Image: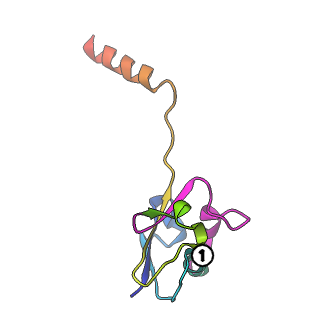
Amino acid sequence: MPITFHIPGALREFTAGLSRVEIEHPATTLSEALSVLWQLYPGVRDRIATEQGEVREHINVFIGDENVRYTGGLASPVTAGSEISIVPAVSGGGDDFGAVLSKSRVSRDA
């Protein structure tokens, strides 16, 4: 049974457009599984890992429903059939969002 990576839209240009990548390698840790992914699609590495080989701060990696930041990081165990999701952090907006929303309501009410 393969290990499946779920690839976010922002990284699909580095996986030939694939939203899912399955590897048959018998990896036992997240680090081993990611190494296989990076061998297949080298462009993904720099978007997920720092120069020191750690998962970038703005990237979340889940094995099943568990965020690996709380389960051992790159040493987190994986097994055949594991589902690994790579999830970029979502941010944006700003302090003025409420003001923009209020102006939008006022202009509609006028």
Q: Which residue is label 1 attached to?
A: 31
Instruction: For the C terminus, give its image quadrant.
Output: top left
Question: In front: 84, or 39?
Answer: 84
Q: Position of residue 36 (x, y in %)?
A: 57, 81
Location of residue 81 in the rendering, given as x and y in whole percent from the top left corner: 39, 81
Horizontal relation, residue 107 to residue 73: left or right:
left
Residue depicted at 49% across the width and 73% down the height? 16
Q: Amino acid at mark 1?
A: Ser
Q: Position of residue 83 (x, y in %)?
A: 41, 73
**Residue at 28% across / 18% down in the picture?**
108
Is residue 3 visible in this depiction of the protein?
Answer: yes
Left-right relation of 110 to 50: left
Front residue of this view, candidates 98 and 110: 98
| Region in magenta | 40-65
Residue 44 visible somewhere in the drawing? no
**Is 59 included in the stretch rendered in magenta?**
yes
- Give the image quarter of residue 109: top left
